[in-house]
Each structure stands twice: as structure tokens, then as C-alpha cells.
């Protein structure tokens, strides 16, 4: 059973993926997790930015664990798992949820030195790219080309999830999935 702090983080990640960070107050984030409002500031004394950063890292870690496990079977398997996670998220939420990492990245204006939430989003995207890039290199892709392809995968999938939500249609993700799988399967070993 998750602790109160963990429940707040999980609830925050869920609400951010549905309403975005700008559309969620600390009170909303606490209520969505079922936690008392006061306990939110007990666990997150720096407020919304601290909670958002932890929620982004939590969501990022969940995806990273799936990627790490599936990439053992190669980049194509990891790619399918990455795509499958987002497909399931979009469909299970009836197009009402996307990626909390992307939500923070596009909504939170970077300030001087960056906000904790935007810093966390950058760290998560970098981690996903790193996992994909490493698998592509192990499959024979050159280092720089593997890194570029990993960036393309993350950017394409994240953007397509947003398109699916806007269009209320899973087809953009399925179309991008087919193209990325073709690209990975035909080029990974020859980059």
C-alpha cells in the first residue's frame, strides 16, 4: 500500500496528465489523491513546483522501468512497449489523459535557472532517450545516429499522443507507430 506521500505523487501525476499543470492547483492535486490539503504542504513544503517535479519523475520512472525491461529484447521490442504504454493511456482515459512529462514541458515557462518541474521533465526525456539510444547502439547503430533516432522516437510519440487527444482518434499514434517500427527495424542495424 503506498504511503500518503506516494499517493499524493501518484494522484498529481494522474491529474497533470489529464488537466495539465497550469490547470491544477495544489488543492486540486491533493483532492485528486484523496489526501488532506494540509498534508500536501507537509510532504511538499516548496509547494506546487516540488510536487509537480516529483510527479514527473514518478511517471518517468514508471515508463523507464518498462523500457528497461522490454529493451532487453531489442530496440523494436522497446519501441513497441513505449508506444503501447501511450496507446493504452490514451484509450483507457477516453482521450482525456496524455503524458504528464509533456504537459509540464509545454506549459511551464522556463525561468532563470529553470523551475523544478521543467528540470524534472528534461531529465525524464533525457533518460528515455538514453535508454533507447543505448539499445539502438547495442543493435549496431552508430552512437550519434542512435541518439538522433532515440530523440526522434521520443519526440514523435509525445507529439502524437497530444494529437490523439486533440483529435479524439488513436489513428495518428498507430500511423506513427508503423513508421517508427519500420525505421527501427530497417535502419537500426545499419545506422
Image (tube, rainbow, N blue to C red):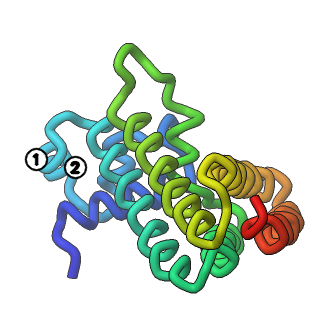
Label 2 environment density (alpha carbons within 10 Å; few <14, some 14–19, many ≥20): some
Instruction: Determine the image quadrant of residue 190.
Output: bottom right
Query: Which residue is identified by label 1?
Result: 42
Which residue sits at x=36%, y=50%?
Answer: 29
Secondary structure found at label 2:
helix
Which residue sits furthest bottom? 73
Which residue sits furthest top? 112
Which residue sits furthest left? 42
Instruction: Determine the image quadrant of residue 81.
Output: bottom right
In-image side of 27 versus 73 (left or right)? left
Secondary structure found at label 1:
helix
In-image side of 47 versus 165 (left or right)? left
Residue sitting nearer the eye, 101 or 35: 101
In-image side of 185 versus 91 (left or right)? right
The residues bearing labels 1 and 2 have C-alpha atoms spaced at a distance of 9 Å
Indicate the position of residue 75 as horizontal and vertical percent values. 64, 73
Which residue sits at x=53%, y=38%?
Answer: 105
State whether residue 124 is above or below residue 190.
Answer: above
The label on residue 2 is none
Query: Which residue is identified by label 2?
Result: 37
Which residue sits at x=38%, y=55%?
Answer: 12
Residue sitting nearer the eye, 108 or 126: 126
Amino acid at each position: 500500500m503506498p504511503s500518503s506521500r506516494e499517493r499524493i505523487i501518484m494522484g498529481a501525476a494522474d491529474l497533470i496528465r489529464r488537466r495539465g499543470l497550469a490547470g491544477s492547483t495544489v488543492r486540486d492535486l491533493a483532492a485528486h489523491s484523496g489526501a488532506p490539503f494540509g498534508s500536501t504542504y507537509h510532504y511538499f513544503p516548496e509547494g506546487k513546483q516540488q510536487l509537480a517535479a516529483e510527479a514527473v519523475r514518478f511517471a518517468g520512472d514508471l515508463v523507464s522501468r518498462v523500457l528497461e525491461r522490454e529493451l532487453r529484447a531489442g530496440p523494436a521490442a522497446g519501441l513497441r512497449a513505449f508506444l503501447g504504454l501511450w496507446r493504452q493511456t490514451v484509450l483507457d482515459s477516453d482521450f482525456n489523459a496524455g503524458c504528464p512529462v509533456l504537459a509540464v514541458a509545454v506549459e511551464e515557462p522556463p525561468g532563470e535557472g529553470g523551475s523544478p518541474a521543467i528540470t524534472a521533465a528534461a531529465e525524464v526525456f533525457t533518460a528515455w532517450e538514453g535508454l533507447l539510444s543505448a539499445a539502438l547502439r547495442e543493435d549496431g547503430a552508430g552512437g550519434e545516429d542512435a541518439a538522433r533516432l532515440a530523440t526522434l522516437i521520443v519526440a514523435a510519440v509525445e507529439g502524437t499522443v497530444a494529437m490523439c487527444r486533440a483529435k479524439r482518434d488513436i489513428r495518428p499514434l498507430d500511423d506513427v507507430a508503423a513508421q517508427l517500427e519500420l525505421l527501427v527495424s530497417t535502419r537500426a542495424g545499419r545506422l
